[in-house]
Structure formats: C-alpha cells, structure tokens
Image (cartoon, rainbow, N blue to C red):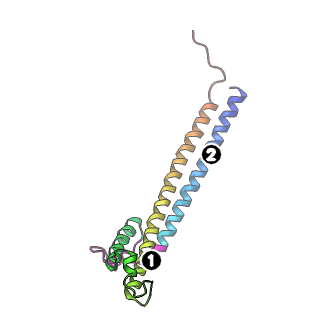
Amino acid sequence: MSRLGRFVSIAIIGLGIAVLAMGVAFVFEGQSKANYIKDQMRAEAVSMAVLGVEGVDPNNVIDSAAEAEKVANRVKEHRLGIAPTYADLMALSPTGKYNPSVTAHLSYNQAMNLENYLYLGVASLGLTTVTIVIGISMIVTGLALALIGFALGRLPKKVPATA
C-alpha cells in the first residue's frame, strides 16, 4: 500500500475513534441529564392521583415524560375550566388586571405554573432522548469508520493482475 493509502487508512481510523468518543459523550450527557430531570421531578413529589388522574397508585409520583404530559393535560383542562382564555380571566377582575386576591386569578396562575413545569419536563426528557439516540448513531458510525480504516490498511500493497 502506498504512503497515501496508509495515511488515508490512519486518518479514517482516527476519525472513527473521534466520532466514537463524541457518541459516548452524547449518550453519557443525555442520560445524566435525563436522570437529573427525573430526580428533580421525584423531589417535587407531585402525585398523579392528587391531580385527579384516576386508576393510579396514590404514591406514584410523576417521573416520566408520559406521566408528566398526561397530568399537564389534566391541569390544563382544570385551568381552562376556570377561564377559557387569559382575557376571560382578566374580565373576572373589576380593574381588568391580574389581582392575586381574586381566587380565580390565583388558581389560574398556579395551574399555569404547574402545567408549564410539567410540559417543560416533557420537552426536556424528549431532548435527552434525542441526544442519546444521536450518541448511539455516532457510536455506530465511529465503529464503522474505524473498521473501514482498518480494512483499508490491510489491503495488499499490489493487486495481482488477472490473465
């Protein structure tokens, strides 16, 4: 194999190792952030049963994207029961402005905060899943590149001529 062929083989192996390392970093970072988000959700100890989801264990706290989305949708239903829009909510105040002493205003905003917290958890866990999948794809690509580079390095120096 020529010097150029040898260089290309080593370069492809090096690129494969670099992509493999980045893939491992993506998987590690995605999983560590997913664990962090789930731990924070568990620390809040928001139970699905407390928020009116039927048929669940009352001790089951929200710690997954599916659970968070289900409960966020339920909270949204309750919030929209107070007022269908924010403008409708403001119409409940004599001044037309937010007033925390108006029970409906306070309940609406508390529901909106919880709803946003839960939807943020859904989006964040979705992003960590995407990061992990990209990392796995990078690992596979890195392995493939390294194997191709290795195979190129093993090619014979000269291909025998056929008759």
Query: Which residue is situated farthest in the front direction here?
Result: 95
Provide the residue designation for mark 2. Answer: 17
Instruction: Provide the secondary structure element on which disc 2 rests.
Output: helix
Q: Is residue 42 magenta?
A: yes
Residue 113: mark in rendering: 1
Mark 1 belongs to which amino acid?
Answer: Asn
Above-or-below relation of 157 to 93: above
Residue 81 in the image: state x and y as whole percent: 31, 77
In the picture, measured across the screen, residue 155 lies left or right of residue 53, that is right
Q: Is residue 54 above or below residue 143?
A: below
Determine if the magenta segment contains residue 45: yes
Number of disc labels? 2
- Asked whether the beta carbons under mark 2 and mark 1 sit within 8 Å of each other, the answer is no
Residue 138 percent location from the top left of the image:
55, 48
Q: Quadrant of the C terminus?
A: top right
Q: What range of the chain is rendered magenta?
A: 40-62
Q: Nearer the viewer, residue 15 or 52?
A: 52
The secondary structure that most of the magenta stretch takes on is loop
